[in-house]
Amino acid sequence: MTESRTATEALAPTGNLRPYAVGALSGAMAGFFFAVCAVLIQTAITETLITRYGSSVDLSMVFFQPSLIIPLCLLGAFLGLAYATARLRTSWPAAGFGVAFAVLMALVVGSLFLFNLMVFSTVVSATRSFVIANGFTKSGTFAEDAIPPAATVSLLAVLLLLEGLAIHIFNKVGMRWMPRLPNVAYGAITAGLGLPGLTMFGLLLFISCSHANSE
């Protein structure tokens, strides 16, 4: 019979910070891979658009840049810590919990990214001509997406889903193989990654609320 939780995933004794440290590290690793993949995909999209549209590509709209790898890594650490906290308080089967967490994470974080336009940029400046009321033709330059937004949003959702699953997998491996350390070391790892990650998540929420209030 399949156990709902492995021995290493059992409820931790009071004061044991090991599961939280593993969660933070797992999230940081998953966040790093997400950030690197996002930057590489955005770079590929940008280079393809430059080849096709030249200087018409709006580089100011590019969000996923190498400078965001560390912030996204820290955001992942917070998500990994949230995973570990929730895992210790549920009795769901490991696989089911991992999938549920990944889906929920993709929905929440993806919604925050979309609300703040933190998506893959495919914006180009296109010249369009149109006929105005008096019959004259007028030309103008407009910003438009070279790739349908639905495609880039779907790609972002898939990446976030994979990040959530990676957190689950890394956490499972980490609970088995992470060396036994003094509890103070686990606390340092948890605080060192979790607190900056919490700051990043709080900043994301703050920006979202600011946008909502300004509309």
Image: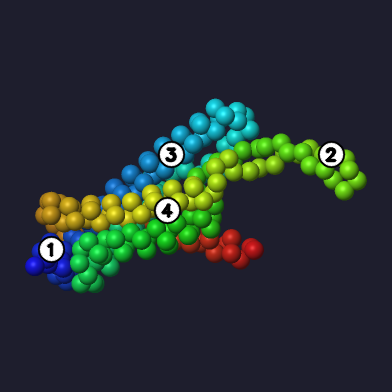
Q: Do tag 4 and tag 1 residues touch (Cβ < 8 Å)?
A: no
Q: Earlier in the sequence, mark 4 or mark 2?
A: 2
Q: Nearer the viewer, residue 101 or 137?
A: 137
Mark nearer the viewer, 4 or 1: 4
Q: Is residue 31 left or right of residue 17?
A: right
Image mark for residue 157: 4
Image mark for residue 41: 3
Residue 121, image x, y percentages: 53, 43
Question: Which residue corresponds to the image point at 38% horizontal and 41% vertical from the top-left?
Answer: 37
Q: Is residue 145 above or below residue 186?
A: above
Q: Which of 22 and 91 is in front in this view?
A: 91
Q: What element carries label 4?
A: helix
Query: How far separated are the C-alphas under marks 4 and 1?
Result: 29 Å
Mark nearer the viewer, 2 or 1: 2
Q: Where is residue 176, by image quadrant?
A: bottom left
Query: How far separated are the C-alphas under marks 2 and 1?
Result: 71 Å
Image mark for residue 24: none
Question: Which residue corresponds to the image point at 54% horizontal and 49% vertical from the top-left?
Answer: 149
Q: Residues within 10 Å of mark 1 (few under 14, many from 20)?
A: few
Q: Is residue 99 above or below residue 53?
A: below
Q: How crowded is mark 3: few (under 14 residues within 10 Å), some or many (20 or more)?
A: some
Q: Which of marks 4 and 1 is nearer the N terminus?
A: 1
Residue 15, image x, y percentages: 18, 68
Quick one: quadrant of the N terminus?
Answer: bottom left
Image mark for residue 6: 1
Q: What element carries label 1?
A: loop
Q: Is mark 3 on a helix, strand or loop?
A: helix
Q: Earlier in the sequence, mark 2 or mark 1?
A: 1
